[in-house]
Amino acid sequence: MRSLRLPAALAALALVVSACSGEGAEGGAGYPRNETLYTTGTAWGPPTNWNPIMEGNYAVGTVGLVYEPLFIFDPNEGEYTPWLAESDEWPNENTHVITLRDGVEWTDGEPLVAQDVVTTLELGHFDIHYSNVWDYLESAEATSEREVTLTFSEPRPQEWMNWVANRAIVPDHLWAEKSQEQVNDDPNSDPVGTGAYVYENHADDRMVWKRNDDWWGTDALGLEMKPTYIVDIVNASNDVTMNMLSNHEVDLSNNFLPGIDQVISSDNNITSYFAGPPYMQSANTAWLVPNHEHPALGDPEFRRALAHSIDIDQIVEGPYTNLVEPADPTGLLPQWEEFIDHELVADEGFTYDSTEAVAILEEAGYLDEDGDGFVETPDGEPIALKLEVPSGWSDWMEAANVIAQNAQEAGIKVEPAFPEHELLIENFRKAEFDLMINNDRSLSNTPWTYYDFIFQLPIRDQQTTANYARYENEEAWELTEQLAATPAEDVEGMAAITSDIQGIFLEDLPIIPLWYNGMWSQASNQVWTNWPSEDEGTPDNFATMWNNMYQMGAIRTLAEIELAE
């Protein structure tokens, strides 16, 4: 359980219940229950930021509800849908021409124009998370009011289409003159977007959005957003969330809830995507990330031994009660099955084998010379590793305990630690950690995003979006960039490159895949129904409001749900 001490948990529950009744909100007004969707599961702290450029730090819904991308991507069908874009064409492999929809307006009444896209891209000249777009983009030009012409110095269609299907477009008339400091640090407390919702208010325990009844997508896409209000509740603890869901005080929980399988089985009004295990679709891979600046963790043989020491089934069947599935040794998600080299995995992949872990350690010179039950380095230095996961993340906390116990049985001293989430983020960006569990990259339009996460170079003083392990392999990074440049329709070419990458990955194990984290989505049918599920006749989009899931089709869920009779 993501636990709080009992008084704190009760206080948090009181705050959340007041939120669901509309009491205490800025403005003081309650929200009609039949017009309001209550969600929870993404935010672990008060909303303080509505800046769509500040990846991972903005309030839930900032991107997706307020700010929108040019395209969205359907991973079930493998198809892109024009969104702010109306159409596009590739006159040649180095040129992409995008035509914007006519009649789209920002919420301050200004029209969406091609220069908005150009300005959004030009922000990448600052030190922000998509600065590397200019490694391969030569120019972005507004060739007419609604037409943008992109010219590439080198074609990277997979990487580029990941940009257009994920990145929020911002208005030129408000962002063009911003400084580096403003782009990185301005909380953007009055967000002006093109999306289906607008800022209503916020408090320490919630973020409230109100439907934009002038949204362009109602007419252009035939999507009528059903809830007038969306109230996203800040997580207090899993106990609090489970109580709220069971009492139908929230409509959608996007967090891991221990015991949810029993609730789904016993309450027909609580549903998930699948009726039985694993109940959830797979959303991302949970990785064990070692800091390669540590003398032992920088050794691939030590990492291989560590990988063999971990009993993933014990985690899947224990803390998760089969709500997740073990990850493939490559770490690639089930949706990318065609890019897994299964013969290579059979020959080079790792499995749980404590005896093999011990043998690898001995062969590499990691021995227990002082008789304390734990190995030292080949130079005789003691090894004591700390495995960190965020405090309150009960599933990961229990998994960390299992991993530590498994590692100790193989002679590797690992102790779990549970710092606050914000402190952990600050520390791993600066490489001030030994081991951590991380799942920052989710399902996307291409497995390139996973390899970019693992191998991205160069290493910076602070690694804010990728390669937290600080693993340096020029060959792997070159292959990753080759993958970015391979057309998505060239499946055979992609598979050949991913096979080469997997050869390096399985030999070095820069990070260790653990399990497929679930697309956590537990919904109440008490007020809203017709949630996505495997059942025939129901939507098959995601009912998950994590940052990039709106751009992966979750925005459609808000138009597909219906009021319960």
Image (tube, helix red, strand yellow):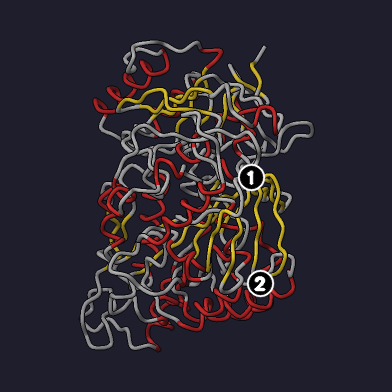
Q: Residue at x 52, y 49 (%)?
A: 115
User: How many labels were placed on the picture?
Assistant: 2
The residue that mark 1 highlights is 100
Circle 1 sits in a helix, a strand or a loop, which is it?
Answer: strand
Tell me: 153 left or right of 474: right
Three-letter amino acid code of the residue under disc 2 = Thr
Q: CA distance from mark 2 to mark 1?
A: 26 Å
Asked whether 287 or 173 is in front, the reply is 173
Q: Residue at x 35, y 61 (%)?
A: 127
The residue that mark 2 highlights is 486
Residue 52 x %, y %: 42, 44
Please, is residue 287 above or below residue 543 in the view? Answer: below
Three-letter amino acid code of the residue under disc 1 = Leu
Asked whether 58 or 216 is in front, the reply is 216
Q: Earlier in the sequence, mark 2 or mark 1?
A: 1
Residue pushed farthest right? 536
Q: Residue at x 36, y 60 (%)?
A: 126
Circle 2 sits in a helix, a strand or a loop, which is it?
Answer: loop
Asked whether 470 or 222 is in front, the reply is 222
Residue 551 in which image quadrant: top right
